[in-house]
Image (spheres, helix red, strand yellow):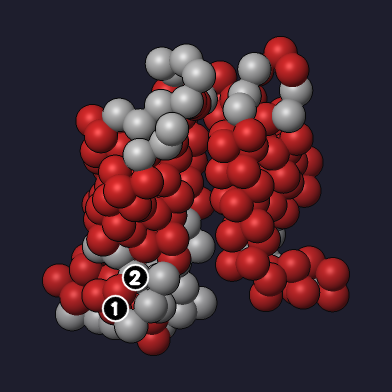
Amino acid sequence: MIDILKTLAALASGYLLGSLNTAVIVGKIYGKDIGSHGSKNAGLTNTLRVLGKGAAAIVLVGDILKGVIACLIGLRLGVYVHSGDAKDCVSLLAAGAGAVMGHNWPVYFGFKGGKGMLTAAAVMFMINWVAALISVGFFVLIVAATRYVSLGTICAAIFFVGISFLPAFGNTFYFQAFASLMALTVIFKHRENIQRLLSGTENKLTF
């Protein structure tokens, strides 16, 4: 029997932690509203464009850390199904999902956040590092071939869902539901990028 209260506590903790949007906080330190400059997205890429490498480095570390810390809280609460593996820890999945949702729709900043891919990637590595690493490799291949970061992100998220259903990974329904939720969130947050990709106006990565 799943402990619903502990699972909800993990979800809430992850959400409140994820809502500490690093890009917004760093922007305020630098005296700029990151949501009013550049692409107006409160994430790493826009921080790099608007505030530079130093600020972007802080956002990079912050977005990863909050995903990791949220997952550690979920692990500590210890609500498992079947085995004792991380991918079977429902409280970990809930905390990770909460962190991504908090990053995307932060309660502290009017529910206007980023696209959550860095935090999501950190969470994926905490839950199933093998599947996450394979997905990152797929992301790199797509970006190298097309130079579209958004396309690589969307494809990697969908790919992560696909491999979560492979019997070789032995994932539970809960993990598969988590992976599907993350992919749907990524697609939803990238809907404007998808429109630009279809119209041929999406910006390409330059080296």
Q: Which element carries disc 2, helix, strand or loop?
A: loop
| Three-letter code, disc 2 | Pro
Residue at 56% of width from left, 19% of height from top?
130
Q: Residue 56, located in which quarter of the rendered image? A: bottom left
Instruction: Report which residue position mark 2 lands on.
Output: 106
The answer to whether residue 144 shows anywhere in this view is: no
User: Residue 87: x percent and y percent?
Assistant: 49, 26
Q: Which residue shows up at 65% across the image and 17% down it? A: 169
Q: Position of residue 77 (x, y in %)?
A: 25, 34
Quarter of the image where one finds residue 89: top left
The residue carrying mark 1 is: 109
C-alpha distance separating marks 2 and 1 = 6 Å
Q: Residue at x 30, y 48 (%)?
A: 5
Residue type at tag 1: Phe
Q: In this view, does 88 lie to the left or right of 166?
A: left
Classify mark 1: residues with Cα within 10 Å, few (<14), some (14-19) or many (20+). Answer: few
**Above-or-below relation of 189 to 146:** below
Q: Check contact, mark 2 vs mark 1: CB within 8 A.
A: yes
Q: Examine the rendering and report whether any part of residue 166 can be seen.
A: yes
- Is disc 1 placed on a helix, strand or loop? helix
- Residue 8: x and y in percent read 34, 52
Horizontal and vertical percent position of residue 172: 61, 27
